[in-house]
Image (spheres, rainbow, N blue to C red):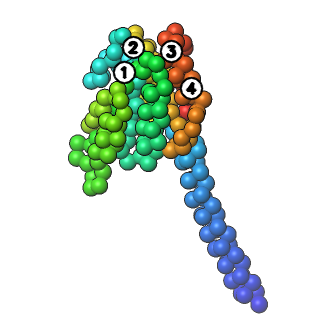
Amino acid sequence: MASRRAGAGLDRRRRDLARRRRLGHHVRLWEHAFVPGAPATAPAAWPAASRLTRDPARATLVLLAHPGCPCTRTTLDELEDLLARLPRPPHAFVVALAAATPPDGWTSDALRARAATIPGVTVVQDVDGAEARRFGAQTSGQVLVYDAAGALRFCGGLTPARGHASDRPARATLAARLASPTATPLHAPV
């Protein structure tokens, strides 16, 4: 009788463990979807070593993206919408990470092709993440805006949560910051 109860207890513990593991998977998915990525450690001034050319007559926007990130399509849609709404859009770069020797099935071709359809965007291939490091990006979808003088004005993301589109307050604030070059820098989640 005691061994049967011990066996039943073991089965119950196994079921509880399996249930917690399933729940853990859902929690991790939820965290990935709704918890912001690591913020950039963006330099306060335009990095002198950057291969990107800052526009001295208007703001310059830099979007750093990883081709394997499923959220990139939504971020590019948000960027296109933002730029279309602005009376004087910034000079915009989409910096697509590219490995010198990419693993099988890993390419930035689709990302670059989609970004190239956005009016006013210059697409740059970032071999091995050199530009991402210069701008301190740690999460795909990181957007940095520097004013005409090269001072950081915005550091964050365009979507409210990874891969979710909406009329996000940060996007509206970014549009306001672009219209007012004297505004203080805004840091928003990615």
What is the secondary structure assignment of the residue under circle 4?
helix
Q: Amino acid at mark 1?
A: His
User: As drawn, is 158 to the left or to the right of 3?
Assistant: left
Place of residue 25 in the rendered image (x, y in percent of width and height, measured from the top left): 57, 59
Q: CA distance from mark 4 to mark 1?
A: 18 Å
Say whether marks 4 and 1 touch (CB < 8 Å).
no
User: As drawn, is 172 to the left or to the right of 134?
Assistant: right
Q: Amino acid at mark 3?
A: Ala
Question: Which residue is farthest bottom?
Answer: 1
Q: CA distance from mark 4 to mark 3?
A: 11 Å
What is the secondary structure assignment of the residue under circle 3?
helix
Say whether marks 1 and 2 touch (CB < 8 Å).
yes
Q: Amino acid at mark 4?
A: Ala
Circle 2 residues within 10 Å: few <14, some 14–19, many ≥20: some
Say whether marks 3 and 2 touch (CB < 8 Å).
no
Between 132 and 116, the residue placed more toward the observer is 116
Residue 147, quarter of picture: top left
Disc sitting over residue 58 in the figure = 2
Question: In the image, is residue 33 above or below residue 75?
Answer: below
Q: CA distance from mark 1 to mark 2?
A: 7 Å
Residue at numbered disc 4: 172
Place of residue 56 in the rendered image (x, y in percent of width and height, measured from the top left): 34, 11
Residue at numbered disc 1: 91
Place of residue 154 in the rendered image (x, y in percent of width and height, measured from the top left): 49, 22
What is the secondary structure assignment of the residue under circle 2?
loop
Residue at numbered disc 3: 179
Q: Amino acid at mark 2?
A: Arg
Residue 150 visible in the snapshot: no
Q: Earlier in the sequence, mark 4 or mark 3?
A: 4
Q: Earlier in the sequence, mark 1 or mark 3?
A: 1
Between 4 and 42, the residue placed more toward the observer is 42
Q: Earlier in the sequence, mark 4 or mark 1?
A: 1
